[in-house]
Amino acid sequence: MLPSGLVRARAIYKRGLAYGKLKEYQQAIQDFDRVIELDPHFATAYYNRGAAHLLTNISQARADCERSYELDAAAISRAWMIKWDWLEKDRPAVFVEYVKPLLLWYGV
């Protein structure tokens, strides 16, 4: 059984994902910030916060993606294949300008 703080982190993480799907990126970022406070080793929280930051704060997006990769390279690589595919379709300018260099940087 997970400690209550980690259970809370998972619940907030899921809410952050829902905000992201609704394109409520600032609310998603706030939720991922809280998740990271509760569980600083939650790699996909950094990853998803980085993805939300791609639209407004590229340097923070890169820092979050780097941290997520440091924490769990294998899981983040799988997640990137899904998220970056979405970005390529829906946000092509962002994808081309910022995401492809990050993918090359990590060898994904």
Image (tube, rainbow, N blue to C red):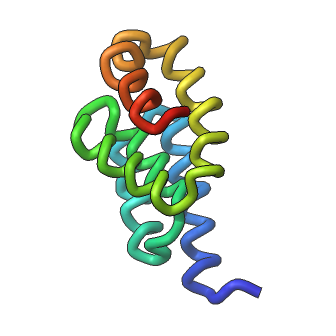
In-front residue for pair 27/51: 51
Direction from residue 65 to residue 57 in the image, left or right? left
The residue drawn where x is 37% and y is 62% is 33
Q: Position of residue 66 (x, y in %)?
A: 38, 49
**Residue 96 figure quarter:** top left
The residue drawn where x is 54% and y is 54% is 44
In the rendered image, which quarter contains the N terminus? bottom right
Q: In this picture, is 58 found above or below 43?
A: above
Direction from residue 59 to residue 64 in the image, left or right? right
In the rendered image, which quarter contains the C terminus? top right
Q: Position of residue 43 (x, y in %)?
A: 52, 59
Q: In this picture, is 14 found above or below 10?
A: above
In-front residue for pair 38/31: 38
The residue drawn where x is 39% and y is 74% is 37
Direction from residue 77 to residue 103 in the image, left or right? left
Q: In this picture, is 19 found above or below 56?
A: below
Q: Position of residue 30 (x, y in %)?
A: 36, 57
